[in-house]
């Protein structure tokens, strides 16, 4: 029996404060030379707190996203009738598509907060104020800017994640009671997170650029294809991998730690189920639900 999954949002998966800044910086006047330089510059100019700009937005929607994804993935897998690699992918893809309703506005706020100036000159006081101002100026369409690109990223990404995670846990023999269960889950969870991000990272770059477009100056892009065309023409194919290193550095430990933690907690929480006459019987063999966290 394969292990079930609980996937959180793929929202914002790289190092705090670095992802969006690296993805959208101008090629004519680059502000950062790479992940490490970006990290050091933020601390020097804005203190450690600068690394966590926009963190409130992902945290604000985390509970709702996890609940939504858990329900959609589980019900879709049951509706498909049986556990198979294809159905794992389809169930994950369905969950990824549905959670975009929450994830897109959340990431828009995170992007704007990370890019705004520090100090008294800042435009937004926080995530809710950011979304309120965007809604006041641009309406519902403005709050959902980048929805199509978010959908194009999250749908296959979640499908790849579930498929990879299911394949790895089966191959590693992850079963309750296994002495090496936690190390195996750490490896499976971390690897699945990396593979998931690798599968759609260029789309994430496009999404960030579209959501940041017009924040400083006139809008540049007319849509997804125009953003891809202009970005490629100005910077070549490497523009679609900008910020990838910081994303992968964070993806492995976050996914690995959360998988192992949730699995162990749920295993102990379930314990033994009471039989029909009060006799203790082993818990269901399907194993505890596992989670891919929201990548804040």
Image (tube, rainbow, N blue to C red):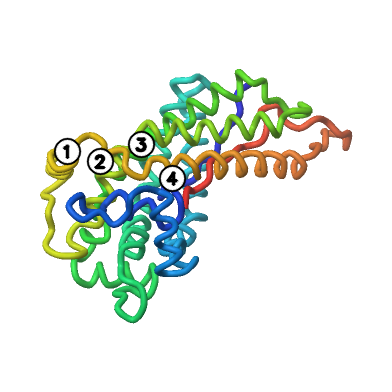
Q: Residue at x 45, y 51 (%)?
A: 15
What residue sits right under mark 2 in the picture?
A: 239
Mark 3 vs 4: CB contact within 8 A: no
Mark 2 vs 1: CB contact within 8 A: yes
As measured in the structure, the alpha-carbon distance from the residue carrying label 1 to the one carrying label 4 is: 21 Å
As measured in the structure, the alpha-carbon distance from the residue carrying label 3 to the one carrying label 4 is: 22 Å
Q: Is residue 64 left or right of residue 139?
A: right
- In the picture, residue 86 is in which quadrant? top left
N-terminal label among 1 and 3: 3
What residue sits right under mark 1 in the picture?
A: 232
- 9 or 203, nearer to the observer: 203
What residue sits right under mark 3 in the picture?
A: 155
Which of the numbered marks, if any, corresponds to residue 246?
Answer: 4
> Dot 4: within a 10 Å radius of its alpha carbon, few (fewer than 14), some, or many (20 or more) residues?
many
N-terminal label among 3 and 4: 3
Q: Nearer the viewer, mark 3 or mark 4?
A: 4
**Which percent across, then down, holds residue 40?**
44, 58
């Amino acid at each position: 029996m394969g292990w079930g999954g609980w996937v959180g949002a793929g929202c914002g998966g790289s190092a705090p404060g670095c992802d969006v800044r690296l993805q959208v910086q101008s090629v004519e006047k680059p502000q950062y030379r790479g992940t490490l330089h970006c990290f050091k510059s933020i601390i020097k100019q804005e203190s450690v707190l600068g690394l966590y700009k926009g963190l409130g937005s992902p945290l604000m929607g985390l509970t709702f996203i996890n609940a939504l994804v858990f329900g959609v993935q589980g019900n879709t897998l049951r509706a498909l009738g049986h556990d198979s690699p294809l159905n794992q992918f389809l169930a994950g893809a369905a969950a990824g598509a549905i959670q975009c309703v929450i994830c897109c506005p959340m990431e828009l706020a995170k992007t704007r907060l990370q890019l705004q100036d520090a100090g008294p000159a800042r435009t937004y006081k926080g995530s809710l104020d950011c979304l309120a101002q965007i809604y006041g100026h641009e309406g519902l369409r403005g709050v959902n800017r980048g929805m199509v690109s978010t959908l194009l990223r999250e749908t296959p990404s979640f499908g790849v994640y579930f498929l990879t995670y299911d394949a790895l846990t089966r191959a590693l023999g992850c079963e309750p009671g296994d002495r090496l269960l936690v190390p195996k889950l750490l490896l499976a969870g971390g690897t699945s997170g990396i593979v998931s991000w690798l599968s759609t990272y260029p789309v994430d770059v496009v999404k960030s650029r579209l959501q940041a477009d017009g924040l400083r100056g006139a809008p540049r892009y007319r849509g997804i294809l125009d953003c891809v065309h202009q970005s490629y023409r100005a910077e070549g194919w490497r523009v679609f991998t900008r910020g990838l290193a910081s994303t992968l550095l964070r993806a492995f430990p976050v996914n690995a730690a959360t998988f192992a933690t949730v699995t162990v907690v749920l295993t102990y929480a379930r314990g033994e189920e009471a039989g029909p006459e009060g006799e203790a019987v082993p818990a269901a063999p399907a194993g505890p639900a596992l989670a891919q966290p929201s990548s804040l």
